[in-house]
């Protein structure tokens, strides 16, 4: 259990971050937990697995990849412990393999939408978006990237390091320079933490400003998202919970303490409506956001009878 608690803490503190990475870490943590679980009764086994699953799911509320990965990993039909353990280990193996392959597939599919000479704007640090950008570059396309800083956690700094390592010409801008710089941009490419049934994109706070400015300037907006980032529960009317993080990510606590009339709001994500998104690149193809329902139904095995 200690290992699983350590992974949960790393996800909560964002030592492990990125919607895809936290999904993979959770699936692997559940696999390792089940491997060591010493119970002989299936009821106890299921109870323990559910408890562990909930610990992982509760670490961060917004990225739907996390509960989806946990559900995909823990589902089993066996009525005995050995069989259930076997199924869960198999599920984790398949999920982790598919997640790795998805990144590569999305890179290939998305790269077709990037042309020689394109200037791409990206936000935060998305492994999925970077897979598309790096694939296009490796194909020999002459591209450059404008990367936002992505306050408050400045994940943009991770992005510019990765782009630099690829040798891709990159410009770093502060988040508030997005609209000013949009005239130079051909395509905006971002990742996703969740996609709802109506095709709305939930991603790092500031994404909706990028998409809005791109829409105004008639530039393309692509989101790159594995099918496990689509939210089945939104079909039942659930809303995506937007994570609010601590004020000290935004301002020094001592400074804040001197300002009794000031409070800090620190939402980690925002919502971009479907009409501002041209295409969602998944591992099974490029779709308009309006097709989210079909993706959920066909690729997440969604059935009304399975839902609460
Ligand atoms: O799965 P990949 O594409 O890596 O990342 C998807 C999204 O996850 C990140 O969230 P955070 O930094 O963990 O809060 C960003 O919002 C990023 O766009």
Image (cartoon, helix red, strand yellow):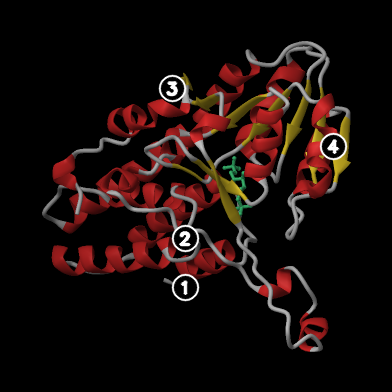
Q: Which residue is mark 2?
A: 61
Q: Earlier in the sequence, mark 4 or mark 3?
A: 4
Cα distance, mark 2 to mark 3? Answer: 26 Å
Q: Earlier in the sequence, mark 2 or mark 4?
A: 2
Q: Which residue is mark 1?
A: 2
Say which mark, if any, is on residue 35: none
Asked if residue 304 lies left or right of residue 239, the reply is: left
Front one among 48 and 119: 119
In the rendered image, the quadrant that contains the N terminus is bottom left
Cα distance, mark 1 to mark 4? Answer: 48 Å
Respond yes or no on whether mark 1 lies under 8 Å from ligand 1.
no
Closer to the eye: label 1 or 2: 2
Closer to the eye: label 1 or 3: 3
Front one among 137 and 117: 117
The residue under the point 79% across, 25% down is 185
Cα distance, mark 2 to mark 4? Answer: 33 Å
Mark 4 closeness class: few <14, some 14–19, many ≥20 residues within 10 Å = few
Q: Is residue 227 above or below residue 141?
A: below
Q: Secondary structure at mark 1?
A: helix
The residue under the point 29% across, 28% down is 298
Q: Which residue is mark 3?
A: 284
Q: x, y (%) of residue 61?
A: 47, 60
Asked if residue 245 lies left or right of residue 163, the reply is: left
Q: Which residue is mark 4?
A: 180
Q: Are marks 1 and 4 in contact (CB under 8 Å)?
A: no
Cα distance, mark 1 to mark 2? Answer: 22 Å
Cα distance, mark 1 to mark 3? Answer: 36 Å
Mark 3 closeness class: few <14, some 14–19, many ≥20 residues within 10 Å = some
Q: x, y (%) of residue 189?
A: 66, 30
């Amino acid at each position: 259990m200690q290992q699983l608690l350590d992974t949960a803490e790393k996800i909560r503190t964002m030592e492990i971050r990125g919607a895809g990475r936290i999904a993979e870490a959770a699936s692997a943590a559940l696999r390792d937990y089940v491997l060591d679980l010493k119970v002989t009764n299936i009821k106890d086994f299921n109870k323990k697995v559910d408890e562990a699953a909930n610990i992982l799911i509760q670490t961060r509320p917004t990225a739907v990849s996390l509960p989806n990965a946990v559900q995909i990993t823990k589902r089993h039909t066996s009525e005995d412990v050995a069989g259930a353990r076997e199924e869960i280990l198999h599920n984790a193996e398949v999920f982790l393999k598919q997640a790795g392959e998805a990144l590569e597939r999305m890179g290939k599919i998305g790269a077709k939408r990037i042309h020689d000479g394109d200037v791409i704007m990206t936000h935060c640090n998305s492994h999925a978006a970077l897979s598309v950008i790096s694939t296009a570059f490796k194909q020999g396309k002459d591209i450059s990237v404008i990367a936002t800083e992505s306050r408050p956690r400045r994940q943009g700094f991770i992005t510019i390091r990765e782009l630099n390592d690829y040798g891709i010409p990159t410009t770093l801008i502060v988040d508030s320079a997005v609209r000013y710089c949009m005239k130079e941009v051909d395509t905006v490419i971002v990742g996703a933490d969740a996609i709802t049934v109506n095709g709305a994109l939930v991603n790092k706070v500031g994404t909706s400003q990028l998409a809005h400015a791109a829409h105004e300037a008639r530039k393309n907006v692509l989101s790159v998202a594995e099918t496990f980032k689509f939210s089945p529960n939104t079909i039942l009317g659930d809303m995506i919970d937007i994570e609010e993080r601590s004020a000290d990510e935004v301002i020094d606590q001592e400074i804040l303490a001197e300002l009794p009339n000031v409070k800090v709001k620190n939402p980690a994500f925002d919502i971009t409506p479907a009409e501002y998104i041209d295409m969602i690149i998944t591992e099974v193809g490029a779709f308009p956001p309006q097709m989210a329902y079909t993706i959920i139904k066909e690729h997440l095995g969604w059935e009304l009878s399975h839902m609460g």
